Amino acid sequence: MKDHVIGIDLGGTKIATGILNRDGNVLHRQVTRCHAGENPEIVIDAIVENVNLLFSHSNFSLEAIRGIGVGSTGHIHSEKGIVLTSSNLPGWDNHPLKKVLEQRLGAKVILDNDANCAAWAEFKYGAGRGSRHMCYITFSTGCGMGIVIDGKLYQGATGTAGEIGHVLVNPDGPLCTCGKKGCLMSYACGLALSRMAEEYLESDKPTLLRDLVNADDCRIAGEDIAKAAQLGDQAAIEMIMTAGRYFGYGLSTIIQVLNPDCIVIGGGLVNIGPILLDPCMEAMNQNIHPVLVGSAKIALSELWNDAGMIGAGALVWEQMG
């Protein structure tokens, strides 16, 4: 009996691949970061290599795998198996990722958005257990959301439900990676923090970021900004508080529109801590109707970096039995 699946989390800077059992336990894993900014062919080669390494480093083979779940960054049409577009990876418009991976890997593939996969993982195995209407929102390289309604993953008519990162919050705001101006993601994610830091460094104002940032880096990492803030750098603190405040606006929109009983917050940059989360919670509560204050439990992810991978694998059980 095929009692194991493979889950793949394809992000803007990381590909995480794991073999999972029906309880959502990761038995073996393989992670690579060699694909950032590359075209689809190189990214797919990296995925295939990850899967092959997974088999070579374990006692599993393809014959033991029920199917492969892939959670990908970007707008995903799950039913068609297509990446409609991706803000974090170039050249993916209308890419038939499901079909290509099935041909390359020789197994059935389930494709969905990475935030949807993380939401499903938290609902099934993590901080969303026991909820009925749950949302998962991530604060990492980008900003995305997955929605569970009445215990079912909600994907929308074209599979792109939950794109909270591209909700307009300021029509005169900075350019987002999607091409619009003033999206939530242009204020509240790692890419937004990088933009704020780069703009600040163009001035002559003092900041520890000048000492922490490698001149050869293509962008300033959110982790470097967090480090500067922890060292007391006022500019970095203000950047993170701004991002946190806009993140709170996003949470207030979720509560007003979807009225969930639980919102799970994940993504690596959430570990920045109170400098980010305190202004986030304040902005959230200030911008919802008073009757909704306290209506949704706010919980931090329990699965963290594994959420997308576990959820992708769990969707194989959900859709293939």
Image (cartoon, helix red, strand yellow):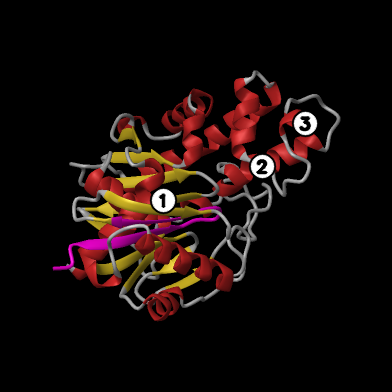
- Closer to us: mark 2 or mark 3? 3
CA gap, disc 2 and disc 3: 13 Å
Residue 113 percent location from the top left of the image: 41, 61
* Residue 145: numbered disc: 1
Closer-to-camera residue (155/272): 272
CA gap, disc 1 and disc 2: 21 Å
Q: Residue furthest right?
A: 204
N-term mark: 1 or 3: 1
- Closer to us: mark 1 or mark 3? 3
Residue 262 percent location from the top left of the image: 28, 39
Magenta: main secondary structure: strand
- Range of residues picked out in magenta: 1-19
* Residue 247: numbered disc: none
Within 10 angstroms of label 3, few (less than 14), some, or many (20 or more) residues? Answer: few
Residue beneath the point at 76% across and 25% down: 207
Image quarter for residue 116?
bottom left
Closer-to-camera residue (292/107): 107
**Residue 31 painted magenta:** no
Q: Residue furthest top?
A: 232
Residue beneath the point at 41% across and 66% down: 52
Question: In which quadrant of the rendered image does the C terminus lie?
Answer: bottom left
- Along the horizontal axis of the image, is 48 left or right of 295? right
Image quarter for residue 3?
bottom left
Residue on which the image places disc 2? 194
Residue beneath the point at 29% across and 43% down: 260
Tell me, yes or no, whether the two marked residues, 1 and 3, touch with CB atoms within 8 Å: no
* Residue 210: numbered disc: 3
